[in-house]
Amino acid sequence: MSSELTGPVEVVGAGLLGTSIALACRRAGIEVLLTDVAPEHVRTATGLGAGRVRRPDDRPQLVVVAVPPDHLAGAIVAALDASDAVVTDVGSVKAAPLAEVAARVAPASLSRYVGSHPMAGSERSGPLAASAALFDGRPWAVTPHPGADDDAVALVSALVRLCGGVEARLAPEDHDRAVARTSHLPHLAAVLVAGRLAGAPPEHLALSGQGVRDVTRVAASDPALWQQILGANADAVTDLLGEVREQLDVLIAAVRDSDRESLEAILGAGVAGTRVIPGKHGGPVRPMRSVFVSVPDHPGELARLFGDAGEIGVNVEDVHIDHDPGRPVGLTELLVLEDDAEHLLGALESRGWTTHR
């Protein structure tokens, strides 16, 4: 078994993640074989240049299973039974599928399976949402079990590097606790906040700003998929929801009683939490500041703003655009390093931009 990824790579499931992996492999010159229970997904993915349809005589070096959680274990077992290839998957939960696969295949076959999970995605789904750059600079968990072959683990690590991901090595159980905290719980929080908007009076919704859009964005994801994800990681998610319920009771009492000391502690804990989230490329968090610029809502203006920021020599770390419903102008928030903010504000104003401090 070789630990060098030369291909072919078979991708089982030509949705967002599967097609994105296929496109990244093709970007690197690796041959890709595509299979999916939905023929239209394969047609779309092949049309995007993600690979070709798998033939019966093909012998993949690596199989990447990218199917919904309810079908994950079965697809992994089928891939292990079909060839002597190394098999990985990109499911968002690792321990439960591993246990099911281990119960259905021999140890020699199980040694060729190594779970993985790229921390990248979108509220959009399907092959048309795919991108070869989806994983660039993003964390990608590799979760070998104790019986995994070393070369199989190395091959999955090679896939992560080829796709531009940043590997994080975790045990399957540790992975599931980690994603419950950093992905599944935040998703449910967004769902609860977004649910309070449904049926709200139009005059309330007219006051929606960028904050509510930021908090609720991921709530637009596919409910059927998330039912499967949460069901597969129920224990870890339930533990965290219990902790949040206790904190919510404290928060309700603090707001009701105008208990400023308790509110300060709760709000301060939130600030502390934001500061421990890793920065860009996994590095330390660096102080950021928002610079707000009014941008006329017609073609070319946003590109001109980015061009001016580039000429000024300030890197824009992130951007948000909030349209003013009453005027043909958008308020653009540029997130930059705190030390660069005043320089950027002054330089943009000298170029005729209207800024807001």
Image: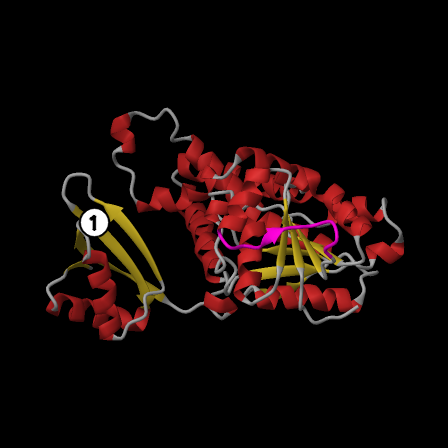
Q: Please tell me which residue is depicted at 85% across the width and 44% down the height of the picture.
A: 104
Where residue 8 sits, quadrant-wise, is: bottom right
Left or right: 10, with 28 as reference point: right
Locate the N terminus by quadrant: bottom right
Quarter of the picture containing the C terminus is bottom left
**Does residue 250 appear in this view?**
no
Secondary element under disc 1, as helix, strand or loop, is strand
Residue 335, image x, y percentages = 32, 62
Q: Residue at x 32, y 57 (%)?
A: 319
- Residue 71 location in percent, x, y? 70, 39
In the picture, measured across the screen, residue 331 lies left or right of residue 143, that is: left
Magenta segment boundaries in residue numbering: 48-58
Residue at image mark 1: 330
Q: Tell me residue 258's x, y (percent).
A: 38, 39
Q: Is residue 229 magenta?
A: no
Majority secondary structure of the magenta segment? loop
- Three-letter code for the amino acid on which mark 1 is drawn: Gly
Please give left or right for residue 109 compared with residue 295 in the image. right
Q: Is residue 56 magenta?
A: yes
* Classed neighbour count for the residue bearing mark 1: other residues with Cα under 10 Å, few (<14), some (14–19), many (≥20): some
Give the tally of numbered discs.
1
Q: Is residue 201 visible?
A: yes
Q: Nearer the viewer, residue 292 or 60?
A: 60
Provide residue 265's location: percent of width, then percent of height.
46, 51
Residue at 62% from the left image edge and 41% from the top image edge = 229
